[in-house]
Amino acid sequence: MAEYAVLMEKEGRVHILEIIDEMAKHKGLGVLNTATLLTDVDVGEEVLVGQKYLTRMPPRLPELISGMARRAQTISSKDAGVFISRLGIGSGDTVLEAGLGSGGLSLHLAKVLGNSGHLVTAEPRSEHADVGLLNLTRARECFTEFPQHTHIEGMLEDVVPDMSFDAIILDMPVHSPAILASAPKLVFGGRIACYAPTTSQLEKCWRSCEEAGLEVEWAGELMERQWGVTSKGGMRPVNGPFGHTAFLIFAQKK
């Protein structure tokens, strides 16, 4: 099994390195033998790499998210947390996620499902799946518990597995065929959620959920605003983008 270490620069940039006893190139750090470099470096200690001092961090979810390999845009922690809570996802559940993308949401799901859960991911684009599966492989070795994981390739409506799901999450350009194909696989009381960047997609998701016999519980967007300490005391909102990520919709099988 592979072993990974998390190193953080003073500026906050995170590097996730596989510990191997050979010289290899690591993006942003150069050519290193990580086994030699980290032999006597424990969590919380610093190590000099080139001209950078980096701190070895525990490989927890925020660090794995910050340092994850990326190709497709990922679902933010803000939205991932609401998916988990509104869908009621927890240990022992079987969850279907399509598409996988870079696996940002998958890392959150794997963390809460634990050893007794089952995560099924679907992705039609192999170039995206390769990145997402790499991030899940890292998480498997870093988390103390990790669910059973099954990955399937293809459009969900063509490859939806013949099994029951406690929750389904869909993040794709066109949701309707996937909703209609996967909704029958929900257990009674199970829920489906969609991540839709535009209002037209959101409306189509709503209508497709109703066509599939599901009851829409909530649809909308979540806004997030960061605050910081001012130079003269007190706090105020941080200057920066106050942007839109996506619209979310939740529907239940009753």
Image: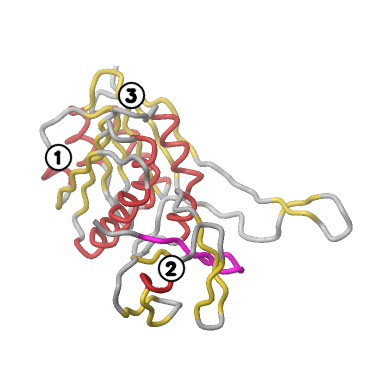
Q: Secondary structure at mark 1?
A: loop
Residue placed under numbered mark 3 in the picture: 252
Q: Residue at x 37, y 42 (%)?
A: 144
Q: Which residues are magenta?
A: 4-15
Q: CA distance from mark 3 to mark 2?
A: 49 Å
For badge 2, the amino acid type reads Leu
Q: CA distance from mark 2 to mark 1?
A: 43 Å
Disc 3 residue crowd, few under 14, some 14–19, many 20+, Cα 10 Å: many
Q: Compare residues 16 and 42 and report the one nearer the observer.
A: 42
Q: Secondary structure at mark 3?
A: strand
Quadrant of the image occupied by residue 12: bottom right
Asked whether residue 69 is drawn in magenta, I would say no
Quarter that holds the C terminus? top left
Residue placed under numbered mark 2 in the picture: 38
Looking at the image, residue 124 sits to the left or right of residue 91; the answer is left
Looking at the image, residue 78 sits to the left or right of residue 101; the answer is right
Q: Is residue 64 above or below residue 112?
A: below
User: Would residue 69 be visible to someone looking at this image?
Assistant: yes
Q: Position of residue 153 (x, y in %)?
A: 15, 52
